[in-house]
Amino acid sequence: MESNDLKPPGEVMPLKKHLLSMPCLEDFEMKGKTVLVRVDLNSPIENNELVQSGRFRAHAKTIELFSQKGAKTVVLSHQGRKGKEDFLPLEKHAFLLSRLTGKKIKYVSDVLGKKAQNAIKSLLPGDILVLENTRFWDGETLGLEMKDHAKSELVRNLAPLADAFVLDAFSVAHRSHASVVGFMPVLPSFPGPVFEKELVSIEKSFDSSLKPRCAVLGGAKPKDSLLVATHLADEDKADHIIAGGLLGELFVFAQGCRLSSDKAEIFEQGDILSQAKDLLEKHPEKIEVPVDLAVIENNKRKEYKLCDLPQGAETGDFGKETIKRFCRIISRSKKIIVNGPIGRYEKKGFEEGTRKVLEAVAKTDAFSLLGGGHTSAVIKEFNIDSSHFSYISLSGKAFIEYLSGEKLPAIEALKSFA
């Protein structure tokens, strides 16, 4: 079983027993019922074709499961943003879902009008219908409060035709959009299997019953990583925070180390530099900062201790001492979160930090949760067996916001109707 495969229904941990006070889908008998399920089929487009992702496959399993249970399944999803090249209809998504589920899937080029309503009314138990891209309707992305979305045309037209609403996409839980939160005040609403597994995995990584807990925060967005680091440190949800990627260099810069002018420009924007200094001062025992860096000289790798770093050096990875220290911390950890690569793994000669850190995580018996847009691709590139990780997040921005302590609209809504 792959790390993101859904467990059979009987094995899914019911949230109201194990995690947060939320309605439990297992309590709903869906046979013969019309179920609106909000998934996230948003996919990259290459050569005019959809690129099938782990998230797409996971939602396909949910849809197939509902059909097997005898539900009349109505699929809501989006693709792209208005004005972008990937803002497309969902006809190809329906075709791909049909291939993945082995079931005939209906598609209607309408979000909420008569065509959509009539198609829903004609469903039989076990049937699956994909409605048009929800963002083709202008009211979807208005960002209103839940009570206002509940009065929207989408909800007024579709809710009377349904018996329940299921939010399976944790990846859109940070969006206060009509198809995400609008149905919750007017229909019995539940988290789906993909949503539940994501949330359970994040909460498990915070659990203090097994220590030490380690967070490896990398990538090219230091502001996001800093928000996560601050929350994990302040709320005692991690014992060690390994500062990778630009976050590591931000802390190095905050300690007075010379870096290239382009990095200095990034770190001096807004107040992230002062925030980094405050965090280092507040939690010196938790923040693990690099002690050496690998720089690009004549297109080759050369390592320097921080005190010897040449003025304006172009950095690409951490040095051997830092990598060794980080891996030692990982090897002793019982719970591990990883988000983003350590260095410029895509540049030959500078993949060492990212590869060795991921290999160190894979070798442990710890509960490991991996996130970040490039994570799955990096694991595949380094030929690391994904089954060695406990869970690989499917959620992107929602994952980061939840790790940062943000209240996600969809989670708060589900809790309020438990």
Image (tube, rainbow, N blue to C red):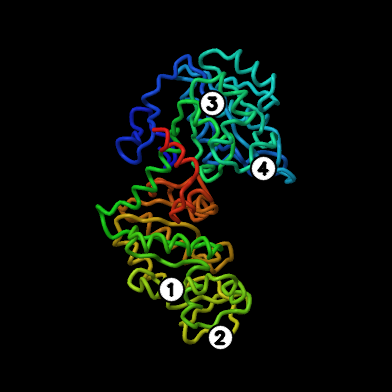
Earlier residue among tags 4 and 1:
4
Q: Residue 276, how many percent across, how many down?
A: 47, 72
Cα distance, mark 3 to mark 4? 21 Å
> Is residue 206 placed above or below 95 in the rendered structure?
below
Quadrant occupied by the N terminus: top left
Q: Secondary structure at mark 3?
A: strand
Disc 1 vs disc 2: which is toward the camera? 1
Disc 3 vs disc 4: which is toward the camera? 3
Q: Residue 49, how many percent across, how many down?
A: 68, 39
Q: Which residue is mark 4?
A: 80
- Going by the numbered disc 4, the residue's amino acid type is Gly
Cα distance, mark 3 to mark 2? 59 Å
Contact flag, marks 3 and 2 (Cβ < 8 Å): no
Q: Which residue is mark 3?
A: 36
> Is residue 119 placed above or below 46 in the rendered structure?
above
Earlier residue among tags 1 and 2:
1
Please give the name of the residue rendered at 56% of the width and 74% of the height, measured from the top-left corner: 315
- Going by the numbered disc 3, the residue's amino acid type is Leu
Disc 4 vs disc 1: which is toward the camera? 1
Q: Residues within 10 Å of mark 3 (few under 14, many from 20)?
A: many
Q: Which residue is mark 2?
A: 310
The front one of 378 and 199 is: 199
Contact flag, marks 1 and 2 (Cβ < 8 Å): no
Please give the name of the residue rendered at 44% of the width and 31% of the height, measured from the top-left corner: 190
Q: Which residue is mark 1?
A: 278
Q: Secondary structure at mark 1?
A: helix
Q: Secondary structure at mark 4?
A: loop
- Horizontally, residue 307 falls left or right of residue 151, namely left
